Image (cartoon, rainbow, N blue to C red):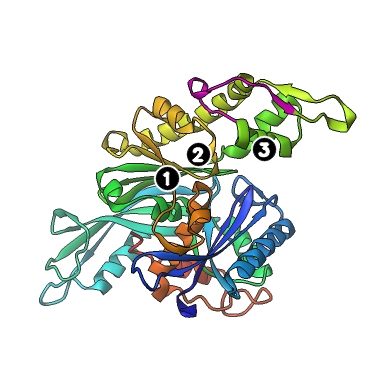
Amino acid sequence: MKNEIAVGLDIGTTKVCAIVAAPDETRPGKLSILGIGRSPSDGLTRGVVTNIDKTVRSIQTAIKEAESQSGVKISTVTVGIAGDHIQSFQSRGVVSISRPDNEITQEDVERLIADTRRVALPSDRKIIHVIPQQFIVDGQDGIYDPVGMSGVRMEAVVHIITGLITAAQNIYRCVQRAGLQVNDMVLEPLASSYAVLDDEEKEVGVALLDIGGGTTDLAVFEEKTIRHTAVIGIAGKKVTDDIRKGFGILTEQAEKLKQDHGFAFKPALVNNDPIVLPGIGGRPPIEIDKQLLCEVIQPRMEEILEIAAMEIKRSGYSRHLSAGVVLTGGGSLIKGTSELAKEVMGMPVKIGIPSGFASGLVREIENPIYATGVGLVLHELKHRDRSNITAVMKNGKGKGSFKNVFERMKRWFDEL
């Protein structure tokens, strides 16, 4: 079973989370959650590492907790990448099939995906994922797996996701300094989609909105394929900052106030009992009105949802999302968020909770804050045959440079 164990490391703006899991032996297709490690994170800003030492300490704390819960020594992890530097666009490629029998092979598909990667990019950006959306063989479109078909000309429409090379390198360095190896680096909204979306939702059209601490991640799916991705640099931490500044209280108090008493939608407010907070530095206690708290939270949450709605519209798929919007991440736990999202976006909304667990820490893991971590585990188990990065950047040199990580990323032509 030890060979089957996978570890997902979600390095977020407000928390670092490590999840240790393995396929359940008694129920195929289900996961057994062996350990969860969490630690506060203050070395990132809007999903990007801004302090290496603080981030390394947070990773080590989370990994240590996950190790003690699971009894497993963790050496390799699959990490997520986010941040408002992430950009995505469509690309096309074409190759000819020169084999005498005109049969399309896996090598032809790989050659075609390599052709779609030939796009002009600034020198500071690299391709993270290339995700095929459809193949076109001799003018016949709507093909999702062309291997074995006959044809003389094959085209592909792909979704290309790029990020800043330095942002990815900094995540990589933090993980390495924490004494771990990077197995894979995955776009966070893509990882979250593995954990909270099912195939039916992806087929009829759905938008996944992961409201985290520093970034809000969006992924749009239709016909079982990812169609659009975006990372918005406004999220839960901004809500906490608004509460802190609005009421002149500590960040910790503001966070607790948001989690315990916060409402994102005024009509959802049940009672208006005042909340009493201890005064700072011997001052008398502060009384905070719940309605007033909602008036501070709601505009910021509306802003996040409106930007997400604009991104969905920009993708061109807003009319194709029959399953509506699935909210996940810690920001979705603010009471009234789903009602507000329904009003702002004008489509069905549900809260996405990670599922598909058979044993272990099932009750603990069924929480939107763990969506990305669970998704990273699922990604690793799905792509295990290619997860073989060896020691990279030892003492800053050696054959394994950071480039190798991206070399493997280029070969991910079957993301979904």
Residue type at tag 1: Gly
Instruction: Report the side of 22 relative to 279 (left or right).
Output: left
| Alpha carbon distance from label 2 to label 3 | 15 Å
Tell me which residue sits at (46%, 79%) in the image. Answer: 1
Mark 1 = which residue?
352
Q: Bounds of the magenta span?
A: 262-276
Residue visible at 55% across and 25% down in the picture: 298
> In the rendered image, is residue 369 in sight?
yes
Q: Position of residue 202 (x, y in %)?
A: 30, 48
Secondary structure of the residue carrying tag 1 is loop
Q: Secondary structure at mark 3?
A: helix
Question: Mark 1 touching mark 3, by CB under 8 A?
Answer: no
Give 138 or 363, whichever is nearer the viewer. 363
Q: Nearer the viewer, residue 34 or 302?
A: 34
Residue 122 visible (yes or no): no
Judge the density around disc 3: few (<14), some (14-19), many (≥20) Cα neighbours within 10 Å: few
Q: Label 2 is placed on what type of residue?
A: Ser
Report the amino acid beneath label 3.
Lys
The residue that appears at 30% across and 39% down in the rendered structure is: 323
Identified at 47% across, 61% down, the residue is 376
Are discs 1 and 2 less than 8 Å apart at CB? yes
- The disc at residue 128 is none
On the image, the x and y values in percent for residue 269 come to: 53, 23
Q: Position of residue 61 (x, y in %)?
A: 69, 62
The residue identified by callout 2 is 332
